[in-house]
Amino acid sequence: MYNNGFYLNIINFKGGCVYVYVFLFLKNEINVLLFLFRSVEHTDGQSVLTDSLWRRYSEFELLRNYLLVYYPHIVVPPLPEKRAEFVWHKLSADNMDPDFVERRRIGLENFLLRIASHPILCRDKIFYLFLTQVFFFYSVFLKYSFDLADSRLKALNATFRVKNPDKVADRLYGVYKVHGNYGRVFSEWSAIEKEMGDGLQSAGHHMDVYASSIDDILEDEEHYADQLKEYLFYAEALRAVCRKHELMQYDLEMAAQDLASKKQQCEELATGTVRTFSLKGMTTKLFGQETPEQREARIKVLEEQINEGEQQLKSKNLEGREFVKNAWADIERFKEQKNRDLKEALISYAVMQISMCKKVGFGFSEYSRYSQSAYEFL
């Protein structure tokens, strides 16, 4: 259990500030609580613990949502999943299960380290307050209406989700467990055989060892699966950046269409001709032409709206170009991070697979040898 478990991590921020965080998980009926202790250096050069605070998982979600809205051009690090359900886990429904808590702790720690190592996000004021202020959520976060600031992004989030994914690990686990039944069959068979009983008993034992090896294999694979799943969640962060760009492009196109429409209306009023069928053309034919004073007033209003529209269109163009420039720079940074992390993870995974094949191959060869000796008596 983690009642007395402390986990120390040092995060170096640019600017010379060094923070030491102590992660402590406690049993709670509702949430996993994360305690962080802040170390502050005094003028005499000594560091003392000045305060402590705790964060719920929901507050981590709020922090990430804030970063998504206020830094739309940045690939924001993902949070760990709330629950990973696989057949071989055999985890209880209790969110305070030690294995689950440990994986959640590592994921949240990695989330903070990713933000702290980012050249832009590490300087964010809200992130600093999240790590240092006790009443961060209530006194600071609520005044930022970021959850409603860009709700149109939700309309573009039309991704398809598979309800029943075909998980290779689940099927592999089932195959190995079927092999476990063979061990029982050989053991029962050996009880009724006299001459080949020893061979069958040994073959059954090695088949049991071969079948039980899947538990250790999948446990080792989980470590690398978590690293790969982090980048699976990163894909959603990349899609969020693309959706924001699509939304900005849509606003730009709507502004251009509105400006073109106003220019056409102004030209029609100035020349007195209507190029296309419109409600204005019908009312003119039914009720007659407007007076020159009315026409001049409308032209003046339209000219003001055209000037405002041109300025707005220019501003949106500049905003879009700046967004693309910043987003491209951060995506290039993300690519370097991804290539480095995935290369390390895949190399380690290949080494683990080699070790696994040697272990399983030895067990299967022993089973084959004893089973062959048993069949010689037939």
Image (cartoon, grey):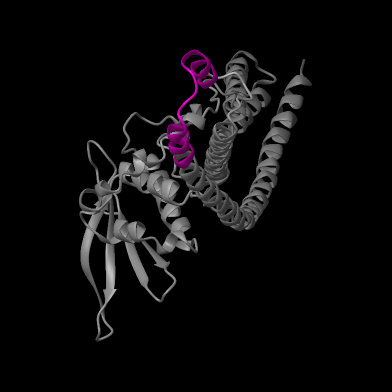
Count of numbered labels shown in the rendering: 0
Residue closest to the far bottom? 44
The residue nearer to you, when weighing 204 against 251, is 251
Q: x, y (%) of residue 121?
A: 44, 59
290 in the magenta segment: yes
Quadrant of the rendered image containing residue 228? top right
Quadrant of the rendered image containing residue 273? top right
Quarter holding the C terminus is top right
Vertical comparison of 173 with 114: above or below: above
Q: Is residue 215 visible?
A: no
The residue nearer to you, when weighing 368 against 308, is 308
Identify the residue at horizontal 63%, vertical 56% (top origin): 332
Vertical comparison of 198 with 39: above or below: above
The residue nearer to you, when weighing 239 against 181, is 239
The residue nearer to you, when weighing 238 against 356, is 238
Q: x, y (%) of residue 237?
A: 52, 43
Q: Main secondary structure of the magenta part?
A: helix
Identify the residue at horizontal 52%, vertical 42% (top origin): 244
Judge from the rendering whether residue 353 lies leftward or rightward of residue 295; answer left or right: right
Q: x, y (%) of residue 249?
A: 57, 41
Vertical comparison of 238 with 23: above or below: above
Identify the residue at horizontal 42%, vertical 69% (top origin): 13
- The part of the chain drawn in magenta is 280-300
Judge from the rendering whether residue 116 lies leftward or rightward of residue 46; answer left or right: right
